[in-house]
Image (cartoon, rainbow, N blue to C red):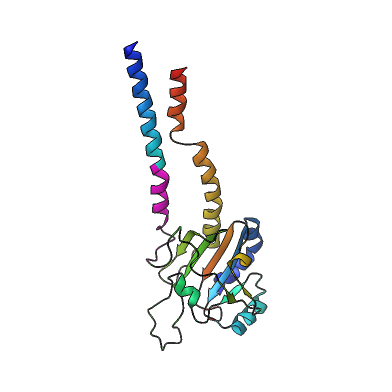
Amino acid sequence: MRRCIRQLRTALLAALAAMFLSTLLPAAEAGAQARGPLDTLEKGVAIGTALPHDLSVPDQEDQVRNFRALTRNRGLILIFSRSLSW
Amino acid sequence: MVQAVAWNDRIEEVRALGYEVATVTYDAVPTLARFAARKAIAFPTLSDERSEVIRAFGLLNENYPSDSPYYGVPHPAIVVLDAQGRVSHRFTESGYVRRPPVDAVLDALRSDGGARSETVEGHPGGGLLKRLRELLG
């Protein structure tokens, strides 16, 4: 009986340890995604940063809209580029 | 310029994924209006003449002196914001020779949606928990 309880306790501890380690893995992967072959610049806002500017600047029709007006249900893809006239 | 046209060609696909596209350049509004009309651009092209947005995102290219006509341009980058305005993805290049292809960005956005549900269903602790339940019988 005691042996059975000991085995059960060992299995329970192993399961808890595995669950704890598994919570650490996604965080480590997220950190690794911040830099990669498609993210080579050592400057700029980091992943997870809150909106640093509300984007209230005019567009090609001279209309000023902010992030709320520009975004769709999943978000906004901002392309920073040199110039559209070059 | 080529990059903006490439995104414009895929705009319906991007919107079907739930995203909008906008460019940020230091161009004046008339410059953007001419470009958008000539290329039939369907998304907003934002005029950041004072480079305020570029600076706020930490992307000002400081290789040009303040008296250069190029002063105020950003480093090339694609920053994806989620619907709450939080930075969810970055795609950057240290030079303008190579740009992240549209496909690479869209693939990352698509696969992230899948990865979230996979993580929940395929939780690494799941197998052990199942075994423990079996043991406890």
Above or below B71: residue B79:
above
Front residue (pair B66, B102): B66
Q: Most extreme residue toward the top, as rendered?
A: A1
Residue sitting at x 64%, y 60%: B15
Residue A72, given in percent of the width and then of the height, sits at: 63, 60
In the rendered image, residue B15 lying in the magenta stretch gets the answer no
Above or below B127: residue B76:
below
Tell me where residue B132 sits by quadrant.
Answer: top left
Residue B129, given in percent of the width and then of the height, sits at: 45, 28
Residue B47, given in percent of the width and then of the height, sits at: 56, 78
In the rendered image, residue A29 lying in the magenta stretch gets the answer yes
Residue sitting at x 46%, y 69%: B57
Residue A14, given in percent of the width and then of the height, sits at: 35, 28
Question: Looking at the rendering, in which quadrant would you find the N terminus of chain A?
Answer: top left
Residue sitting at x 49%, y 77%: B52
Q: Most extreme residue toward the bottom, as rendered?
A: B67
Task: Report the side of B76 relative to B18 (left or right).
Answer: left
Per the rendered image, the range of residues in magenta is A24-42
Front residue (pair A86, A6): A6
Residue sitting at x 39%, y 29%: A15
Tell me where residue B23 sits by quadrant.
Answer: bottom right
Above or below B32: residue A67:
above
